[in-house]
Each structure stands twice: as structure tokens, then as C-alpha cells.
Image (cartoon, rainbow, N blue to C red):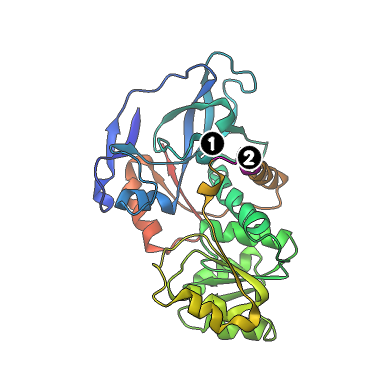
Amino acid sequence: MKAIQISRTGGIEVLEPVELPTPSPGPGEVLVKATAIGVNYFDTMIRTGRYRWMPKLPFVLGNEMSGTVAALGAGVTTLKVGQPVFIAGYEIGNRGGLYAEYAAVPEKAAWPLPPGVGPEAATALTNYQLAWILLHHAARGVTPHTVVVYGAAGGVGTALIDVARLAGATVIGTAGSADKCAVVKARGAAHAIDYKSESVIERVQALTGGHGADIVFDHVAGKAFTDGLKMVAPLGMIVSYAVLGGMPETDLFKEMRANIEKSPAVRCFTMHTYDHMEEPRREAMARAVELLGSGKVKPAIAARFPLADARRAHDLIEARTAAGKIVLVP
């Protein structure tokens, strides 16, 4: 079978098309033939060697795959050959291996897809799983009247807009161009802020009457993190779930004390917290499947590339110009 492998870390040139043996499903496993493969930003972090939980090389990237069941291992009872499914990377320990034409995985790692959920849309399920957890678990204790979503035109950003909006929140999204702000508004955000041409702090304060946002969802960190402290509402929370912009250069405790009149809270979050918390992790995925199956949300697909063109897909996701999910097609 065809797959994309890395044998060393570096730029997009380390993504190597390879031929590997097609796996056979063992007892309790299913073989899935890929139809669409999701590209996630943390795939690029593994590729460049910046991921905290680096795998051993050589390594086949990929933790998001939709496809059809091609074969059943002994003892499989809940799935059948030909059934559309989605493989959730968190259910296979984020071991990768899904930038490939086939994958053999445990039966419970393959989620049956409801009618109406296509294979490309299904690759966004982990985005919605994460968005659900960020809002309902990571930000627990804070009522989300108004939320700010950084990078709201991206895969997780658009999912956060959907999940927060359906929970009754007023969503303020940030994006880096007028076109991407239009995507954010079309997605259902009440307001979109172009962070390259406007002051996010001033706009959030103006839009909330000086009160601030109850929750700021921050995947950027860097200066954006300390900016978040200035726009959060009293007893509000910043949920920091990635550091794409690098670590803040200032003393974080000092910055928090400088905004002590708001009694701000900070949640530093990673999905690896749920590595050994199966029940809430699977509950969130079930919610994501239910949400897409209901038709209330339709994931935005930004671009699709042949599997062999994984380099172009990584180039696009790192450019941060895409609005929505990037998909590889075998």
C-alpha cells in the first residue's frame, strides 16, 4: 500500500511516499480502506521534531482517517465489511499510521458514521471532539455568555464556533485577513476581528461594553496570551490549548497579578490528559458524531490533495491561510 513516512525531522521535504505491506487485522481489529485523511497541525509538529510526545522514526504520520471496513479480524461483532467508519487517533494512542491507503485498528477505534456524514466531513470529527472538550470540560465552571476564539477560520476554530454557538454563546472570532473574517462570520460568529489590522483587545472591550469575554480560547500563546488577560471578563478564563506562536516572553504570574481585579483563571490544556480517561474522551467523540449526524453543522473543507501530495498539504497548513479542514485523498 502507499503511505507517507518520515525517517528524519525537518521541512516538507522529509515527507516520503513509500510502499508498505498492507496490514492484516488481528483478533478484535478491523482493516479500514481509506477514503479521506485529515491533516492536523500537530502532524507538522511531529514532522519538524517539535512535538513533546515524539514517536520513534521512521514513522507514518496521520491520526484522522475515514473510510470503509475492508476486512474483519476474529471476534469483531459491531462492524461489517463495507461500513463507513472514522478512525479516531486518540483511540489508537495517537500512534499515527493513517497517512496510508489502509489501517488495521481495534474495533472500538473505528466509529460508525451516520447517514449523511461524508468521508471528508468526517475527518473533522476530532476537531469537534476537541472543541466539545474545550468548552464543556476545560472551561468548566465558567458560563460561556461571550467567548473569543483565536484563529477562528481554522479547523478547530470553526468547530469551536459551532459548538459554542449551539451552547448559546456569543462568539467573537479572530482571523488574519478580510476573507478569513468573512468565513468566520458566515460560520455563525457574531463578530470577526482582523488581528492584522485591528486591536483585538480594544474591539473585544468595545463589543462587550467593557466587560470582556468569559472565555478566551487561545492556541497561539506568545503575546496573544498576555493580550487575553486584558480582554477576559471578571472571573473569566483563558483556555490555552497550543503554543503555535511560542511561549510568552513576559513573567506570566506578574501579568496575571497585573490584572488581579478580574481574578482571571488560566487552563493549560492538552488532549493527552485524556490518554487514560477513556469514558469522557469517547463521550466527547460520540457528541461530535451526533452533532455532524444531526446536520446542525457542516465542517468547512479548505482544500484536498492526493495522498502523494502531502508536502503541499503541509505547506498550506503551515502558511495558515486555509479556512477549514485540509484533506488528503488516497
Out of 65 and 216, give the one closest to the viewer.
216
Please give the residue where the numbered disc 1 appears in the rendered image: 91
The reply to whether residue 194 is visible in this rendering is no
Mark 2 neighbour density, 10 Å: few (under 14) some (14–19) many (20 or more):
some
- The answer for how far apart the CA atoms under marks 1 and 2 are is 8 Å
Query: Which secondary structure lies at badge 2?
Result: helix
Report the span colored magenta.
276-281
Residue with the most extreme top position:
74
Q: Which quadrant is home to the C terminus?
A: top left
Q: Which quadrant is home to the N terminus?
A: top left
Q: In percent of the image, x 64 and y 53: which residue is there?
A: 132
Residue 189 drawn above or below residue 154:
below
Q: In percent of the image, x 59 and y 83: which residue is there?
A: 203
Please give the residue where the numbered disc 2 appears in the rendered image: 282
- Give the main secondary structure, helix, strand or loop, of the magenta stretch: helix
Image coordinates for residue 198, horizontal then vertical, percent: 51, 83
The reply to whether residue 287 is visible in this rendering is yes
Q: Are marks 1 and 2 in contact (CB under 8 Å)?
A: yes
Q: Quadrant of residue 210?
A: bottom right
